[in-house]
Image (spheres, rainbow, N blue to C red):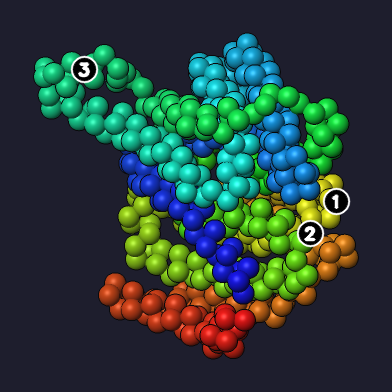
């Protein structure tokens, strides 16, 4: 239990920037969905989908390789310097290639009048790639406070600039055009810009983040170790393909919607789907925070005799948390979440939310299970599993997204179900294959029981629908309490004081 409590504490600490950052960033979604039309918001999500895919390429698994070799090499500084130099050289090359071909790339992705977007994102990706190893170093050295401080500073700058350019500047110019503040804003603000300020804010935040990481970067001895570098690349190479396939699973549905739907509705539909996808924020926040803490923890815990027992217990608690997140989000969706967080013109897509929430729950379980191929060094399995998921994603999206207005099938509902099937398949396959190479005695009864209970209680809420809002909130709260009571009843023996003090 000591190890599990340590992981819980680290998840909480590493989760501070993730949780607060995501929450603060999510506060921008009501702004975006009220300031921008769905088509404009769709464009934002298309570019960030491309950025997610390219980020995997420009980091090429080196972050995970750093954790692996940092635990096994006696000279940890050589691991840090080799990984840092490798990413520095590749990031510079990437930036040069993209910048010199920005016009052709803009034409290829159907944004011929916005090659500046391509250049901005090239800089964002290069800066974020350079920050990957220093952030990993802070995690490996168990310095969560500095990690959280830097992350939160970058997030704060990004959000602050969004609010400044999208709210404050238009307000000042409309109310105080001739004043000192108005004249200052005239110098830096372009009224015809809209989503451009989202991208520029991100670029500034990434730049400041890298500057704050300079104390770690300057520790590099700037000496690459060729033999170590080859071994790190050999370990990381399958992770690159796994990451690319994973990003296809996570973001390619928005790109396919953009290209397969009729042009007159494509960006609009992407905007609706992307806004509803954001509702899964509580699930993704927890999973992201958990992953930050779990990866170095699992590598360190592997040395202990009871490692597999600890992994199994961790899975139990993980399932409890994600099942509760699913239930709470879905029960209070209509009462609070949608009215507060998403503009009304985006509500038409809320039917995909339970499907996407459960899909992301499956993804979180898959991340938990995937430690087997990282610990055993069989990272090629990660690539194969993600590739299988990517194939499922592509086939189902091409099948279920309409190619023309006369060939309407399911649109973004098809994308949501494709995501569900993809992550569900990857989760099951990872468990089955992992039990062969790295058997862990997971409690499948609790696994299915807690998830099934949360789905059952949500289903009851869709059948019994009180008309008065206050009664609806009370009824949904009772359903949450039922879930928590069952969990406490089942887990009470494990949560006893004697177990915690052993």
Q: Residues within 10 Å of mark 2 (few under 14, many from 20)?
A: many
Estimate the spatial distance between the alpha carbons at disc 1 and disc 2, rounded to whole Å. 8 Å
Residue on which disc 1 sits: 378
Q: 408 or 420, which lies in front?
A: 420
Q: 304 or 466, which lies in front?
A: 304
Q: 436 or 352, which lies in front?
A: 436
Is 157 on the left or on the right of 455, as rendered? Answer: left
Find the residue positioned furthest to the front: 74
Q: 228 or 27, which lies in front?
A: 228
* Location of residue 183 with respect to 369 vertically, above or below: above
Q: Disc 3 vs disc 1: which is toward the camera?
A: 1
Q: Residue at point 80% right, 28% down?
A: 225
First along the sequence among labels 1 and 2: 2
The answer to whether marks 1 and 2 mark residues whose Cβ atoms lie closer than 8 Å is yes
Estimate the spatial distance between the alpha carbons at disc 3 and disc 2, rounded to whole Å. 57 Å
The answer to whether marks 3 and 1 mark residues whose Cβ atoms lie closer than 8 Å is no
Per the rendering, the mark at residue 372 is 2
Q: Quadrant of residue 467?
A: bottom left
The answer to whether marks 3 and 2 mark residues whose Cβ atoms lie closer than 8 Å is no
């Amino acid at each position: 239990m000591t190890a599990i409590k340590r992981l819980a504490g680290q998840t909480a600490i590493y989760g501070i920037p993730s949780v607060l950052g995501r929450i603060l960033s999510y506060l921008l979604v009501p702004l975006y969905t009220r300031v921008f039309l769905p088509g404009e918001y769709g464009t934002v999500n298309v570019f960030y989908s491309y950025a997610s895919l390219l980020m995997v390429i420009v980091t090429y698994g080196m972050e995970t390789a750093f954790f692996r070799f940092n635990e096994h090499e006696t000279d940890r500084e050589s691991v840090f310097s080799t990984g840092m130099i490798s990413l520095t050289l590749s990031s510079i090359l990437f930036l040069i290639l993209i910048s010199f071909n920005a016009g052709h790339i803009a034409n290829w992705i159907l944004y011929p009048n916005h090659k500046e977007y391509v250049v901005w994102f090239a800089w964002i990706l290069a800066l974020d790639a350079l920050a990957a190893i220093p952030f990993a170093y802070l995690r490996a050295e168990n310095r969560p406070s500095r990690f959280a401080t830097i992350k939160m500073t970058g997030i704060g700058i990004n959000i602050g600039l969004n609010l400044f350019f999208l709210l404050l500047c238009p307000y000042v110019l409309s109310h105080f055009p001739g004043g000192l503040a108005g004249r200052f804003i005239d110098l830096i603000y372009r009224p015809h810009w809209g989503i451009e300020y989202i991208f520029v804010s991100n670029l500034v935040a990434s730049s400041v983040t890298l500057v704050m990481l300079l104390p770690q970067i300057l520790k590099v001895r700037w000496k690459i170790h060729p033999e170590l570098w080859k071994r790190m690349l050999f370990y990381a190479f399958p992770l690159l393909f796994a990451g690319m396939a994973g990003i296809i699973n996570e973001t390619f549905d928005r790109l396919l919607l953009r290209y397969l739907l009729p042009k007159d509705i494509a960006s609009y539909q992407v905007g609706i789907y992307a806004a509803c996808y954001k509702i899964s924020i509580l699930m993704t926040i927890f999973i992201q925070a958990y992953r930050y803490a779990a990866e170095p923890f699992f590598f360190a815990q592997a040395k202990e005799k009871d490692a597999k027992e600890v992994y199994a217990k961790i899975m139990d608690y993980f399932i409890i948390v994600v099942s509760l997140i699913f239930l709470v989000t879905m029960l209070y969706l209509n009462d609070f979440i949608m009215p507060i967080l998403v503009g009304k013109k985006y509500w038409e897509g809320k039917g995909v939310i339970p499907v996407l929430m459960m899909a992301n729950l499956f993804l979180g379980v898959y991340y938990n299970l995937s430690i087997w191929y990282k610990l055993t060094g069989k990272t090629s399995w990660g690539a194969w599993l993600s590739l299988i998921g990517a194939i499922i994603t592509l086939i189902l999206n091409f099948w279920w997204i309409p190619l023309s207005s006369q060939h309407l099938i399911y649109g973004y509902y098809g994308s949501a179900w494709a995501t569900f099937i993809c992550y569900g398949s990857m989760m099951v396959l990872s468990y089955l294959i992992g039990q062969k190479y790295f058997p862990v005695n997971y409690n499948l009864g609790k696994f299915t029981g807690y998830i099934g209970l949360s789905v059952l209680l949500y289903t009851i809420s869709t059948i019994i629908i009180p008309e008065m809002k206050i009664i609806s909130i009370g009824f949904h709260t009772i359903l949450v309490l039922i879930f928590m009571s069952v969990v406490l009843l089942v887990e009470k023996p494990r949560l006893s004081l004697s177990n915690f003090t052993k």
